[in-house]
Amino acid sequence: MKASIAIQVLPETKDQQELIRIVDEVIAFIKSSGLHCHVGPFETTVEGESYDQLMDIVKECQHVAVRAGAQSVSAYVRVVYKPDGDILTIDKKITKHA
């Protein structure tokens, strides 16, 4: 793996049920990418070989949330990118804790 992102999407909604519904749609979009991901209570982590592909996912998450009904959306993103080597993968980070 060359890159990973951790993204937390926070849509503006009228109530918690709506927030959960929209976040679920964003997570479904991320999973549809086919990339390895891990859903946590605060963020979803995705890893892949292409930095650009991951940045496209970050961008599209905002669009998915708005199309799902969010008035606005904030996102917090962390990125690890190592073009000439491998990053520490999701599995290496969490397998021992599962």
Image (tube, rainbow, N blue to C red):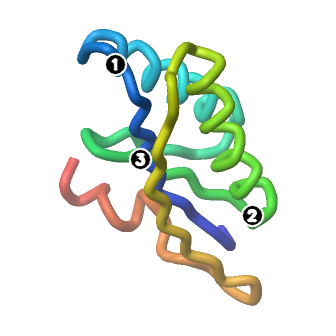
Mark 1 or 2, which is nearer the eye?
A: 1
Q: Is residue 59 left or right of residue 40?
A: right
The x, y position of residue 2, in whole percent, is 68, 73
State yes or no: discs 1 and 3 in contact (Cβ < 8 Å): no
Quarter-wise, where is residue 91 in the image?
Answer: bottom left
Q: Nearer the viewer, residue 90 or 51?
A: 51
The x, y position of residue 24, in whole percent, is 44, 20
Return the residue at label 3. Answer: 8
Q: Secondary structure at mark 3?
A: strand
Image point 61% across, 37% down: which residue?
Answer: 62
Image point 68% across, 31% down: which residue?
Answer: 63
- Most distant residue in the left direction: 97
Q: Nearer the viewer, residue 92 or 80?
A: 80
What amino acid is found at the position of numbered circle 2 in the picture? Glu
What amino acid is found at the position of numbered circle 1 in the picture? Ile
Q: Residues within 10 Å of mark 3 (few under 14, many from 20)?
A: many
Image point 64% across, 49% down: which residue?
Answer: 58
- Most distant residue in the bottom direction: 84
Return the residue at label 2. Answer: 49
Return the residue at label 1. Answer: 20
The x, y position of residue 10, in whole percent, is 39, 38
Relative to residue 28, is residue 77 depicted above or below?
Answer: below
For marks 3 and 2, the one nearer the N-term is: 3
